[in-house]
Amino acid sequence: MIKKGCFFVFVIIPVSIGILYYLYQKYGEELIQKGNKQVIRLVGEKIQNEFKELNGGKYSDSLKVYFDDFMDKISEENRELAEKKIKEAYEELKNTVDKNIGDSLNFENIKKVLLNYEK
């Protein structure tokens, strides 16, 4: 009679590994792409929440549209590059933008930062 440990080692583990390998080969790229889009979307939402804290609604609509365009262009790139650009842009925006002022100078600063990272 075969022991439970032997059965587990010789049958269940190789079958499980084979199933996982097959699923990765068949659906791996699709899952990675969905994950990339999800990460980029979450980071974009966080940055948009930061923009909402800016006082002065005069430029908020323009800023939202401009940022959405930026995120669309960034999300077309590979994941590592997109994450790096978004993180760097976010850090620079935190240092550049004065949250108490929602004027055209702040809007122009944000546009410049986003343009630098679109390239």
Image: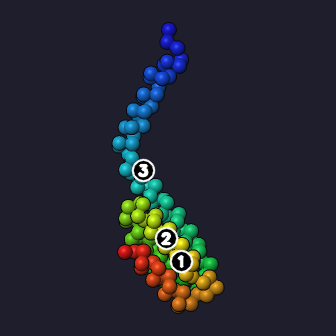
Q: Secondary structure at mark 2?
A: helix
- Nearer to us of marks 3 and 2 is 2
Q: Secondary structure at mark 3?
A: helix
Sequence-first disc among 3 and 2: 3
Q: Earlier in the sequence, mark 1 or mark 2?
A: 2
Amino acid under disc 3:
Leu
User: In the displayed structure, does residue 55 sit left or right of residue 23?
Assistant: right
Q: Nearer the viewer, residue 17 or 41?
A: 17
Q: Is residue 9 above or below residue 2?
A: below
x and y, in percent, of residue 103 in the image: 56, 90
Tag 1 near tag 2, CB within 8 Å: no
Q: Earlier in the sequence, mark 1 or mark 3?
A: 3
Considering depth in this image, is 46 or 10 the residue closer to the camera? 10
The answer, for residue 88, to whether it is visible in the render is: yes
Identify the amino acid type marked 2: Glu
Q: From this viewpoint, which residue is outermost toward the left?
A: 26
> Which residue is depicted at the point 62% across and 78% down?
53
Q: Which residue is mark 2?
A: 88
Quadrant in which residue 76 is drawn: bottom left
In the rendered image, residue 4, in percent from the top left (x then y), is placed at 53, 17
Whether pointer 3 and pointer 2 mark residues with C-beta atoms closer than 8 Å, the reply is no
The residue identified by callout 1 is 93
Q: Secondary structure at mark 1?
A: helix
> Mark 3 sits on what residue?
31
Disc 1 to disc 3: CB gap under 8 Å: no
User: Label 2 crowding class (10 Å Cα cut-off): few <14, some 14-19, many 20+?
Assistant: some
**Mark 1 and mark 2: span between their CA atoms?**
8 Å
Q: Disc 1 to disc 3, how far (Cα)?
A: 31 Å
**Pointer 1 local density, CA inside 10 Å: few below 14, some 14–19, many at least 20:** many
Residue 12 rendering spot, x and y as whole percentages:
47, 25
